[in-house]
Amino acid sequence: TKAQGKASVEAVFAEITNAAKSANETSLPGFGKFKVKEGLSEGTQSLDRHDDTVAVARNLAFTPAKALKDALNK
């Protein structure tokens, strides 16, 4: 049913979110990988910045699987 499908999709998203919070990579075979990447926050890369505290931003990156790339490029 529509409700069961929605619950299944929400469960998958919840697991991806939990893995991301733990900085773990999540892989969905045939679809792709979700991975947490850390970098500097926007605006903190100034060369004249003398402050030792730099804000770190965590972002979720997605890398599509080869099967998904192939399907998109047919």
Image: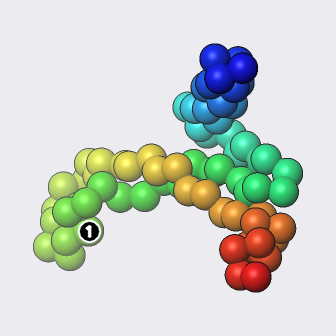
The answer to whether 11 is drawn above or below residue 64 in the figure is: above
Q: How many marks?
A: 1
- Measured as percent of width and height from the top left, residue 25 is found at 71, 45
Residue count near mark 1 (Cα–Cα under 10 Å), binned few <14, some 14–19, many ≥20? few
Nearer-the-camera pick, 42 or 3: 3
Q: Which residue is mark 1?
A: 45
Q: Quadrant of the C terminus?
A: bottom right
Snapshot quadrant of residue 51: bottom left
Snapshot quadrant of residue 6: top right
Q: Is residue 44 visible?
A: yes
The answer to whether 30 is drawn above or below residue 47 in the figure is: above
Snapshot quadrant of residue 71: bottom right
Q: Quadrant of the N terminus?
A: top right
Q: Which residue sits furthest front?
A: 1
Coloring scheme used: rainbow
In the structure shown, which secondary structural element does the residue marked by tag 1 occupy?
loop
- Measured as percent of width and height from the top left, residue 11 is found at 67, 23
Nearer-the-camera pick, 45 or 4: 4
Q: Residue at x 65, y 50 (%)?
A: 34
Nearer-the-camera pick, 6 or 11: 6
Q: Residue at x 71, y 81 (%)?
A: 73
Amino acid type, callout 1: Gln
Nearer-the-camera pick, 21 or 1: 1
The answer to whether 62 is drawn above or below residue 15 in the figure is: below
Q: Residue at x 73, y 43 (%)?
A: 26
- Measured as percent of width and height from the top left, residue 61 is found at 56, 56
Q: Is residue 11 visible?
A: no
Q: Which residue sits furthest bottom?
A: 74
- Measured as percent of width and height from the top left, residue 2 is found at 65, 23
